[in-house]
Image (spheres, rainbow, N blue to C red):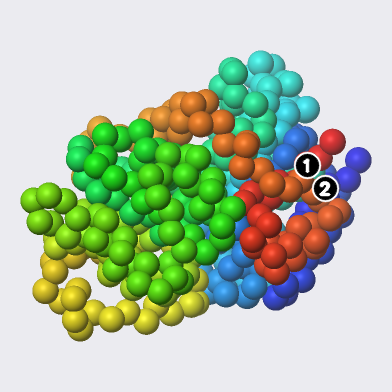
Amino acid sequence: MKRHSIFFVTERKIEIVEAEIPALESGQVLVRSINSAISPGTEMLVYRGQAPQEMAADESIAALGGNLKYPLKYGYAIVGEVVELGAEVDPDWLGRQVFAFNPHENYFVAQPEQLLAIPEGISVEDAVFLPNMETAVNFAMDGQPLIGEKVAVFGQGIVGLLTAALLARYPLESLITFDLIPHRRELSLANGAQESFDPREEYVLEAAKTRLSSPSGHVGADLVYELSGAPAALDQAITVTGFNGRVVVGSWYGQKRANLDLGGYFHRSRIKLISSQVSTLAPELSGCWTKARRFNLAWKMIAEIKPSKFITQRFSLDEAAAAYQLIDTQPEKVVQVVFTNS
């Protein structure tokens, strides 16, 4: 029995590396992977060589030690079954289905405190969406939508779709979305958005801003999310934001630069740009909220939304190169790709 791990070797090059499975220490467990999900945002920056290589992979995740320099294992959404226990581990862990923030591989060793038991009633294909759902919950918390607000979301990839699904549960006046890909716009409408636009169409931003107007005369969105991963979309998000509105920037652009026009409309509009990232909680929420509480809410939303419906392709680990190439070259065909280990 060998461990097979996906390695990002250099720009747009993937290899499967075989190694011995380490012997368990007394407080560790061995997990056999069932499936894992590719992050089409963060992982594609790593795949394309657009992530800053000197940056820590993720200081909040033990399995992602080191920086983003090639070669590296990466990934942070894996579901598996505990198949072996160290001498001091509670026997109740054996056979349990768990989630872990761990790179893509068929077996991995972890400590029980690094694992999250999958709640009863949630399938393994829904459970693999936990990081994306937690991110969507975090965006909702950071944006703080109010009753009756007008909200827009740029980007209807998997995180954008989940964020829109959460926002659709609020008593908003309106919820509109933007995406380049027709299929994603269709999913967005089915997911609770009232309208979904192609941001490249002529005059679409002006038309959307007009539709976001209220009878009181306030023009533009109260709250806008930029989740597309495209720096140019941040300028578009500012364009549709109304006076004193908020723009939550959830995209990570890596080494890509955002060329913003801040000298005109933005200058006098008191628009707030809010950085949002799931590895931390907003300080003003820390009195009541913990990461554990946010995880519990994310699990609840997974049970309600059942995000496995957004899986568009399934690959084995051995087909990893083809999976990343598909996302890179044919994004119009992809919403969520998962690796399966049967």
Q: Is residue 261 left or right of residue 105?
A: left
> x, y percentage for residue 208?
31, 61
Marks 2 and 1, the one that precedes in the sequence = 2
Contact, mark 2 vs mark 1 (Cβ under 8 Å): yes
The type of residue carrying mark 1 is: Thr
Residue 88 in which image quadrant: top right
Element type at mark 2: strand
Whole-angstrom CA distance, mark 2 to mark 1, is 5 Å
Q: Is residue 270 above or below residue 81?
A: below
Residue on which the image places disc 2: 316
Q: Nearer the viewer, residue 106 or 226?
A: 226
Tell me the tag on residue 340.
1
> x, y percentage for residue 105?
76, 48
- The reply to whether residue 235 is in sight is yes
Residue at the spot x=56%, y=22% of the render? 119
Residue at the spot x=58%, y=68% of the render? 45
